Amino acid sequence: MKPTIVVSDDITLVTLQNIPADIGFVSEVFEKIAEMGVDVDMISLSPVQSSMTSLSFTINDNDLMKILGYTSKLNDGTVKPIVSSGNCKISVNDPGMEHCPGVAAKVFRRAADVGTDIRLITTSESQISLLVTKSDFDSAFSAIQNALD
């Protein structure tokens, strides 16, 4: 296994609290965001516990103003948008991860060892992405890079 690490900065995390637990509503949110020409990257939908849930996603910091006007009016203003700008994304990529248990554990342990403030995690069979605060980026990146060498 030879993972590569890709980084991005100037990332805004948007969390929409109190949205209907309805995939139709979620699809409408992302359709509208696409119509605004905004690229969405990481997406995480909280497990549904009732008729309401939370949805988190990341965008480029430059697109924040486009999103704020829209999200503040969602569902007649009952949706609560929470925004955190100025974050960085660290992505560990390797197709071999699919059949190699423990890679996520190693990445998370190294991030924990340096006290990283992780805002969001998304994964697939071949990628682990961590959204971290800009102030924690250097130490988290170094720790993860050292763990995978």
Image (cartoon, rainbow, N blue to C red):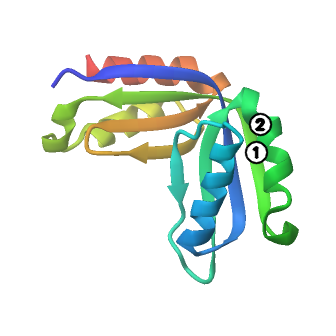
Answer left or right for 143 relative to 115: left
Q: Residue reaching furthest bottom?
A: 50
Answer left or right for 45 relative to 68: left
Eyeballing the image, is 52 above or below 99? Answer: below
Q: Tag 2's secondary structure?
A: helix
- Number of labelled discs? 2
Image quadrant where residue 81 sits: bottom right
> x and y percent of residue 3 in the render?
26, 23
Residue denoted by label 2: 64
Eyeballing the image, is 72 above or below 93? Answer: below
Residue at x 36%, y 34% (from the top left corner): 107
Answer left or right for 31 relative to 144: right
Q: Label 2 crowding class (10 Å Cα cut-off): few <14, some 14-19, many 20+?
A: some
Q: Are marks 1 and 2 in contact (CB under 8 Å)?
A: yes
The CA distance from mark 1 to mark 2 is 9 Å
Eyeballing the image, is 149 above or below 121? Answer: above
Whichever of callouts 1 and 2 sits on the residue coming sooner in the sequence is: 2
| Residue nearer the viewer, 91 or 59 | 59
Eyeballing the image, is 87 above or below 75? Answer: above
Residue denoted by label 1: 83
Type of amino acid at the residue the image marks with label 1? Val
Type of amino acid at the residue the image marks with label 2? Leu
> x and y percent of residue 19 in the render?
69, 69
| Residue nearer the viewer, 125 or 1 | 125
Q: Label 1 crowding class (10 Å Cα cut-off): few <14, some 14-19, many 20+?
A: some
Quarter of the figure that contains the C terminus: top left
> x and y percent of residue 114 in the render?
50, 28
> x and y percent of residue 147 in the render?
31, 23
Answer left or right for 31 relative to 147: right
| Residue nearer the viewer, 85 or 25 | 25
Quarter of the figure that contains the N terminus: top left
